[in-house]
């Protein structure tokens, strides 16, 4: 293994000294759970990035890839961290095929740049919204789907191809640019949600969708959780085609006062229904939804459209996919349940654990059974907090697993995260361990951050 | 071990009534719907549980016997052909629908369930949900087969391929372990293992349980048949429709050769000047239909459409679909066998692809009729031939290879929905570099280092010389 000084020289030889840093400010900016890299490197081409990954592999340096850095709070604390590999300059659009609705772009390209490119052509990539700064590669490896997934699909439905660099020097391309393609194993899927454990995604191919003619949100206030979940179930069973079906805890509603007109109290809950498409169809769905909600006891409703929607989606993204920016210690947990277990699961969250200083607040996707919960921890972190949170998580996971669900810790204070099993024990972990031996046998990619300690 | 001893041991695992070992039985399981034939088998076994399969796989591992799982043998790429003898594990006894949970939009089935049977069951029980994938063979093909090939169908344009409809799997790995991946709940932590295993063509393990997504039946469906003078006009209309932001449920194209043979078989009555037909299916809400229909009609008119017929009833819609659904059967009128090519191109390249397909046919002196899932750019040139004529068979296979090369050249793929199997394994380098293939093969090596599980498939034979036959 070469020295770090030699590594820096070598990296400078690959990408130029202007793209290699070891100053304190840069290292601190790339710290994960206060663990800093020894060097930060920013390649300008995918070939350079592949060379860096190969160098890390041959010299056994631990490398953590960074896209736009929006979701680095995910996963466990890295066991080792030598090299921060910034993909922020890999932002080229390789091919935008308007007529075939496909986009090939480098992995560091922020989604908002894709919107800027495709909106004039009346197309969009239905992950995030027009202001999403996360990179295309980051969205892929964190399996972050957009708010409109109910209608437009999730990452797995939209990714057509990837180019990945492996630590043994391989630069491989999988998939293609057509929607139907069953040539060989669907390797794209290995990298979705992989957190870079099997290779560094350097280029992505996505399918796009046509921008809808009309786009509206119906916000509906309900007096109780039971009533709103009953309404959500009825909406799922109706012939309506919502793009999103979200539930908001009362505290979230109050936080989002910039877009929602109500000040509410638990157990009140707000339902957000997004409809888009042909104007006549949107109008009919708003009408039917309003009537259906009224039969389930809704108290009030309002329609949101136009420039308020990006604000709404920014709030939603900030809640679901960003680490809290406040100084308070927060624990963010993502829960997955079958939709019919949503009510029972949220009711369970209403029992505030003793380590929390205020009730748990949450946003839920009632279409897919996802809940993003935030726990405000007691400000002074006691020694036994880790055990208390782990016990709470264990109980929660046991209950969820009984109904096919799971819980993942998505953000936590560094000292706490190091004491937690953030992933749980998801199905198929033994296969992931097996693949790791074939793709990254010396564990240089994001070591220790992934499922099963990979 | 002699064959008799082997049969006795297999019978001890699955029961004596579930082992087929006569010469005739072993011979018929060497076939599927492809043009290929297998080598002599040890036996065919019909397990009833995942545990039995785990024991069978362990037995094969111990005795180094190759094996493969088989559904109803409708595959056309030879993925279910036993190329190295051994065991065929027939999934016909595992055909239970284990659970229908419409409130959560899922069903749990065993792999031997026939596609159409699940749809029929859902209809009969009054569900307003269905399992969407609809390969042309759906009345006989299994959901396990869909998973194995990541099958497509007529409605992929809007609803996606099989992978988009599979949430989780139970799989017996080649080491005998039974593992679950994915589940009823989306976004399980970790990589998308379900997506990785769908389409593996039975080379990474044997699927024993499948969690499928159920989707609500659309409120409104409009089916139209548009006739054009030329294939170019029909194919360009498809690009116009999708380019304008419309997303029909299906856009199926037939060329004149297919229309003629279908007309002979089921008497549609196409006019003589029609050179291509487009079946257009729109679905969604009632309110979506009038304007979408009008936009489609306008695009058709811009391409000099000869006629547009809109079905006024479900029966009329079925009649419009008849020309598509009867097409492969009707091809039997032209030859004892039909070789179906399965290439895919970006949809705007479809006119060029079809022109070049016809040129290839002329070059080899072959009659080619074309069907296409045009919305997806998935073309199915169909070539009637006599399989007993080795020269003609070789010619047809070479024409197929040439067509696939064209598809790749135009930015497409060598298989849109039927898989690689043994048919296209040597065409994989058209799509993938040696590095791509080597990295892809690591998944196979991780699962099955001795290559006993559906051996020597998918990857080019030149890559597989390090594994004993």
Image: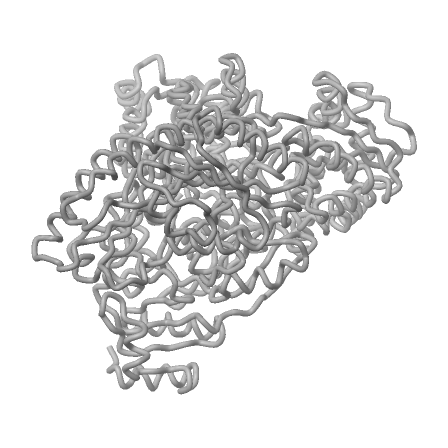
Front in this rendered view, residue A58 or B319: B319
- Colouring chosen for the image of the structure: one colour
In the displayed structure, B265 sits above or below B373; it is above
Q: Residue A112: horizontal and vertical position, in percent? A: 53, 62
The outermost residue toward the right is B273
Q: Residue at left 47%, top 58%?
A: B436
Image position of A267 (left or right of A419): right
Front in this rendered view, residue A295 or A403: A295
Q: Determine the image quadrant of residue B423.
A: top right
Q: Residue B190: horizontal and vertical position, in percent? A: 33, 48
Q: Determine the image quadrant of residue A68.
A: bottom left
Image position of B264 (left or right of A315): right
Question: Is residue B292 in view from this perspective?
Answer: yes
Q: How many labels does the image show?
A: 0
Front in this rendered view, residue A338 or B320: A338
In the displayed structure, A161 sits above or below B381; it is below
Image position of B429 (left or right of B291): left
Q: Residue B153: horizontal and vertical position, in percent? A: 60, 33
Q: Residue at left 87%, top 37%?
A: B305
In the displayed structure, A49 sits above or below A362; it is below
Quadrant of the image containing the N terminus of chain A: bottom left
């Amino acid at each position: 293994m070469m020295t770090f000084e030699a590594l820096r020289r070598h990296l400078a030889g690959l990408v130029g000294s202007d793209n290699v840093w070891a100053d304190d400010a840069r290292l601190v900016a790339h710290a994960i759970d206060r663990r800093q890299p020894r060097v930060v490197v920013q390649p300008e081409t995918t070939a350079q990035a592949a060379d860096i990954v190969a160098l890390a592999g041959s010299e056994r340096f631990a490398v953590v890839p960074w896209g736009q850095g929006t979701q680095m709070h995910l996963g466990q604390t890295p066991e080792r961290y030598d090299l921060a590999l910034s993909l922020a300059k890999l932002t080229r659009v390789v091919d935008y095929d308007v007529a075939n609705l496909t986009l090939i772009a480098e992995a560091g390209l922020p989604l908002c740049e894709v919107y800027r490119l495709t909106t004039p052509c009346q197309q969009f990539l239905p992950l995030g919204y027009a202001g999403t700064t996360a990179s295309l590669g980051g969205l892929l490896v964190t399996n972050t789907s957009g708010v409109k997934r109910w209608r437009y699909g999730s990452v797995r439905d939209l990714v057509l191809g990837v180019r990945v660099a492996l630590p043994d020097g391989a630069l491989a391309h999988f998939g293609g640019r057509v929607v139907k393609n069953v040539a060989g194993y669907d390797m794209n899927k290995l990298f979705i949600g992989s957190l870079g454990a099997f290779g560094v995604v350097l280029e992505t191919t996505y399918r796009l969708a046509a921008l809808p003619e009309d786009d509206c949100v119906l916000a509906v206030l309900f007096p109780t959780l039971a009533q709103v979940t009953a309404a959500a179930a009825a909406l799922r069973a109706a012939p309506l085609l919502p793009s999103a079906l979200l539930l908001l805890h009362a505290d979230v509603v109050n936080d989002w006062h910039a877009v929602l007109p109500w000040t509410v109290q638990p157990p009140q809950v707000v339902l957000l229904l997004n409809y888009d498409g042909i104007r006549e169809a949107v109008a009919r769905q708003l009408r039917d939804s309003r009537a259906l909600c009224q039969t389930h006891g809704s108290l009030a409703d309002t329609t949101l459209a136009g420039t308020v929607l990006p604000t709404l989606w920014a709030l939603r993204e900030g809640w679901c996919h960003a680490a809290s920016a406040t100084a308070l210690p927060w624990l963010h947990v993502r829960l997955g349940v079958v939709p019919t277990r949503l009510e029972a699961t949220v009711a369970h969250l209403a029992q505030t654990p003793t380590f929390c200083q205020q009730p748990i607040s949450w946003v839920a996707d009632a279409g897919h059974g996802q809940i993003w919960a935030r726990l405000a921890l007691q400000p002074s972190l006691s020694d036994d907090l880790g055990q208390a949170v782990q016990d709470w998580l264990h109980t929660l996971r046991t209950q969820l697993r009984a109904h096919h669900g799971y819980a993942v810790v998505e953000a936590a204070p560094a000292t706490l995260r190091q004491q937690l099993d953030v992933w749980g024990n998801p199905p198929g972990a033994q296969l992931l361990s097996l693949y790791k031996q074939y793709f990254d046998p010396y564990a240089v990619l994001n070591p220790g951050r992934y499922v099963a300690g990979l | 071990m002699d064959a008799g001893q082997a049969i006795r041991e297999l019978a001890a695992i699955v029961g004596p009534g579930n082992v087929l070992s006569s010469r005739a039985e072993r011979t018929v399981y060497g076939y599927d719907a492809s043009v290929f034939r297998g080598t002599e088998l040890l036996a065919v076994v019909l397990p009833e549980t995942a545990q039995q399969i785990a024991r069978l796989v362990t037995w094969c591992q111990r005795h180094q016997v190759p094996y493969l799982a088989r559904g109803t043998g409708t595959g056309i790429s030879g993925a279910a052909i036993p190329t190295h003898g051994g065991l065929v594990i027939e999934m016909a006894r595992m055909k239970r629908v284990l659970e229908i949970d419409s409130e959560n939009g899922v069903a749990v089935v065993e792999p031997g369930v026939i596609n159409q049977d699940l749809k029929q069951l859902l209809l009969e029980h009054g569900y307003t949900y269905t399992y969407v994938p609809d390969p042309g063979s759906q009345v006989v093909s299994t959901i396990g087969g869909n998973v194995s090939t990541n099958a497509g169908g007529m409605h992929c344009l809007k609803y996606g391929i099989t992978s988009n409809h599979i949430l989780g799997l139970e799989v017996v790995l080649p080491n005998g372990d039974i593992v679950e991946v994915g589940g009823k709940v989306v976004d399980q932590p970790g990589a998308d293992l379900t997506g990785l295993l769908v389409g593996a063509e039975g080379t990474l393990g044997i699927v024993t349980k499948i969690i499928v997504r159920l989707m609500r039946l659309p409120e409104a469906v409009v089916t139209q048949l548009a006739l054009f003078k030329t294939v170019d006009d029909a194919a360009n209309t498809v690009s116009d429709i999708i380019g304008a932001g419309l997303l029909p449920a299906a856009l199926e194209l037939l060329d004149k050769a297919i229309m003629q043979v279908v007309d002979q078989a089921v008497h549609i009555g196409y006019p003589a000047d029609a050179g291509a037909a487009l079946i257009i299916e729109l679905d969604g809400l009632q309110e979506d239909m009038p304007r979408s229909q009008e936009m489609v009609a306008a695009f058709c008119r811009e391409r000099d459409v000869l006629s547009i017929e809109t079905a006024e009833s479900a029966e009329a819609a079925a009649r419009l679909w008849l020309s598509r659904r009867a097409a492969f059967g009707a091809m039997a009128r032209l030859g004892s066998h039909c070789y179906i090519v399965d290439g895919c191109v970006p949809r705007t390249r479809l006119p060029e692809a079809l022109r070049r397909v016809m040129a290839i046919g002329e070059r080899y002196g072959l009659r080619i009729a074309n069907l296409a899932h045009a919305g997806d750019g998935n073309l199915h040139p169909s070539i009637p031939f006599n399989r007993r004529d080795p020269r003609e068979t070789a010619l047809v296979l070479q024409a197929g290879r040439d067509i696939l090369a064209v598809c790749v050249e135009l930015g497409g793929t060598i298989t849109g929905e039927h898989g690689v199997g043994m048919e296209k394994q040597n065409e994989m380098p058209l799509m993938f570099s040696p590095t791509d293939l080597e990295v892809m093969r690591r998944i196979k090596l991780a699962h099955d280092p001795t290559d006993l599980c559906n051996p020597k498939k998918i990857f080019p034979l030149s890559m597989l010389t390090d594994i004993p036959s």
